[in-house]
Amino acid sequence: MKWKTQDADVFLKSGEYVDSILIPLTPVSFSHEFKSSVTMSEYTELLTSEIERQLHGRLFLSPNFTYVKNEGALERLTSFLEHVKNSGHFKHIFLMTSDVYWKEFEQQLSGQLFWVPALPLETMDEKYKLEVIKEQVKPLFQLIFNDWQRSINS
Amino acid sequence: MSKEDISRRQFLNYTLTGVGGFMAAGMLMPMVRFALDPILKEGTDQELVAVTSMDEIGNEPKRFDFKIKQKDGWYESDVTQSAWVYKAKNGDIIALSPICKHLGCTVDWNTDPSHPNQFFCPCHLGRYTKDGTNVKGTAPLAPLDVYDSQVKDGKLYLGKAKPRKGA
């Protein structure tokens, strides 16, 4: 489900089926890291939207969490995750980013972090691009399914 | 002297308003027409899109991804869609939409080890038989949608996915 009124209505009605949230973490910068943050954000969005497409009925795709590096990004994300958790809707929280910045905070975040380095997709043609994205998300699905499985068993 | 129906001043007024109005209409009509264009266009059925060549289709359902242009009023975008395609015993080509009828996840073929040869939805464990009929007792309440399909020059073309009656 996406951050759209149409999906929001379904969410209000069938919220008990939607117990997972996927939060894209995308950096913003207009100085020397400008181009790389655009590449990372674009890549993260491609992956997250493909995951959302396939798991539409159980996974909510959150709006992007955008941040300027070193500007208290960790504190902001922590309090955002706190809010998400306290809403009581989501048992499974997944974070997706191409920015290696988050890797060192992985343990402190209340959610599973998927860190996937960005590939330069701009030069690829459409068909090949689709193929690459498909391959890239495959193991991520496995991680998500494993997490779901664990909650059944526990 | 004949009866004067119309004064010179009136005559000029009428002609000028007439001509002016005609010119204004000539200018405004195309503008209005352009502004409303997407609404006036007929809602044509979605065009058929070439998805795959026929020799790639076997008896086992195989997933094909393709892109269609989706129009939402003035906004046009590319949307990725998938289809599960296989050849039925009588030779018919069956193209099923992978969108689960429960809440819209994408179903997969033969991925649930305890129920082989069925479509399986990983989100809420919904199941469908090979022809797309929903298995009773699982989450979905309707069979999978079927694509309009057409075979031309050895290629499979798919159109719109249409819903069927529940089992």
Image: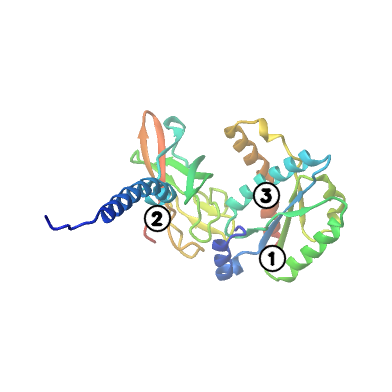
Q: Secondary structure at mark 3?
A: helix
**Disc 1: CA contacts within 10 A as few (<14), some (14-19) or many (>=20):** some
At a point 78% along the width and 67% down the height, the residue shown is A82
Apparent side of residue B153 relative to residue B106 in the rendered image (left or right) = left
Q: Amino acid at mark 2?
A: Pro
Q: Position of residue A144 (x, y in %)?
A: 68, 54
Q: Amino acid at mark 3?
A: Gln
The earlier-in-sequence mark between 1 and 3 is: 1
Q: Position of residue B140 (x, y in %)?
A: 49, 61
* Marked residue chain, label 1: A
At a point 60% along the width and 68% down the height, the residue shown is A15
Residue matched to label 3: A142
Residue matched to label 2: B163
**Disc 2: CA contacts within 10 A as few (<14), some (14-19) or many (>=20):** some
Q: Position of residue A7 (x, y in %)?
A: 56, 62
Number of on-image labels: 3
